[in-house]
Image (spheres, rainbow, N blue to C red):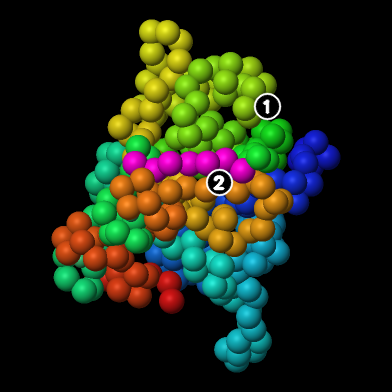
């Protein structure tokens, strides 16, 4: 693990910081995406589907097992073989993966990504973020966030992994590489900057002091966010979220929800988020545009062209 010695002990990171340390990697996101969409369970199947080197795949799977996202299970097929099954913790990443997929379809002009069919109404779900309490839609603007006294996203160095290790797969790949999401989530600094923006930070100096980020790294990430159309530079030198950037709150919501539900952070490091219109504590759900009911993992399936339907992971 590169740079491990400069990183704070994992226990010092907030739950969100820990989640980013686990998930903030393009290969990890691609492995999970294939597990959910294609129900891939074996080393050979990921290797063939992703064109990933065996050593990189082995290290990522080992980490994911170590974090309790997959468990290694033996089964008999002539001789004993092993497969990686999503644990309960792993399965609870489903909404995050669907949110990434949805955001890419809508905001990254990736309409060729397959739609999600809702079994309960038979329509394309076109999921949107809602509040689990009042079932109204929810955006960054109608939530209120209170920081714990020690809320820290990441004060550690840049991502432990080399960037740009993933070669984009063909444009025609219907499962999708999700380049824009990976640009954001695949780099811990990028997610930290965007998270800070959701929580009201707009100025260079404030990003710098709140995140403890080197100016050169910050300059680079801000420039990329402007190129991606996520940030809008303002005349006064600050950065505002564009509609595309604001919409990424849907992904951020499920990241926060999973992190804080699954990974214990140090006391006082949690974010407390409230849905302002109803006053309920943060409980993000995905709602179906057609029937306005919450989407559940067992009740949706991706429509893969030419292959009928693919159920998402059980
Ligand atoms: Zn609500
Ligand atoms: Zn529906």
Q: Secondary structure at mark 1?
A: loop
Image-based side of 309 in relation to 265, left or right: left
**Cα distance between the residues tagged 1 and 2:** 19 Å
Per the rendered image, the range of residues in magenta is 142-148
| Residue count near mark 1 (Cα–Cα under 10 Å), binned few <14, some 14–19, many ≥20 | some
Label count reads 2
Q: Is residue 67 left or right of residue 259?
A: right
**Which residue has dot 2 on it?**
271
Residue in view at x 47 percent, y 47 percent: 273
Return the mark for residue 212: 1
Residue 164 falls left or right of residue 11: left
In which quadrant of this rendering is ligand 1 seen? bottom left
Please tell me whether residue 147 belongs to the stretch shown in magenta.
yes
> Is the residue indicated by label 1 positioned so its CB lies within 8 Å of ligand 1?
no
Tell me residue 133's x, y (percent): 34, 61
**On the rendered image, what quadrant is the C terminus found in?**
bottom left
State yes or no: discs 1 and 2 in contact (Cβ < 8 Å): no
């Amino acid at each position: 693990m590169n740079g491990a010695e400069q990183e704070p002990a994992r226990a010092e990171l907030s739950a969100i910081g820990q989640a980013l340390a686990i998930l903030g990697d393009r290969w990890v996101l691609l492995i999970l995406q294939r597990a959910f969409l294609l129900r891939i369970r074996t080393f050979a199947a990921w290797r063939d589907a992703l064109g990933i080197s065996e050593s990189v795949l082995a290290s990522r799977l080992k980490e994911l097992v170590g974090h309790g996202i997959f468990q290694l299970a033996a089964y008999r097929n002539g001789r004993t073989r092993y497969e990686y099954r999503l644990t309960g913790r792993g399965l609870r990443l489903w909404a995050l993966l669907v949110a990434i997929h949805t955001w890419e379809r809508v905001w990254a002009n990736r309409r060729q990504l397959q739609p999600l069919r809702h079994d309960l109404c038979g329509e394309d779900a076109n999921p949107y973020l809602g509040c689990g309490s009042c079932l109204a839609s929810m955006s960054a603007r109608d939530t209120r966030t209170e920081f714990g006294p020690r809320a820290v996203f990441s004060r550690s160095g840049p991502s432990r992994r080399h960037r740009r290790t993933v070669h984009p797969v063909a444009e025609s790949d219907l499962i999708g590489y999700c380049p824009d999401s990976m640009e954001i989530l695949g780099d811990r600094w990028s997610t930290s900057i965007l998270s800070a923006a959701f929580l009201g930070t707009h100025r260079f100096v404030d990003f710098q002091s709140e995140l403890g980020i080197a100016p050169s790294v910050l300059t680079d990430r801000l420039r990329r966010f402007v190129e991606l159309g996520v940030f809008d530079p303002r005349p006064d030198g600050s950065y505002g979220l564009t509609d595309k950037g604001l919409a990424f709150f849907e992904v951020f919501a499920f990241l926060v929800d999973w992190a804080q539900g699954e990974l214990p952070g140090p006391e006082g490091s949690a974010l407390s988020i409230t849905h302002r219109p109803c006053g309920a504590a943060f409980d993000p759900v995905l709602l179906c545009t057609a029937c306005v009911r919450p989407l559940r993992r067992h009740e949706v399936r991706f429509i893969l062209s030419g292959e009928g339907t693919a159920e998402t992971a059980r």
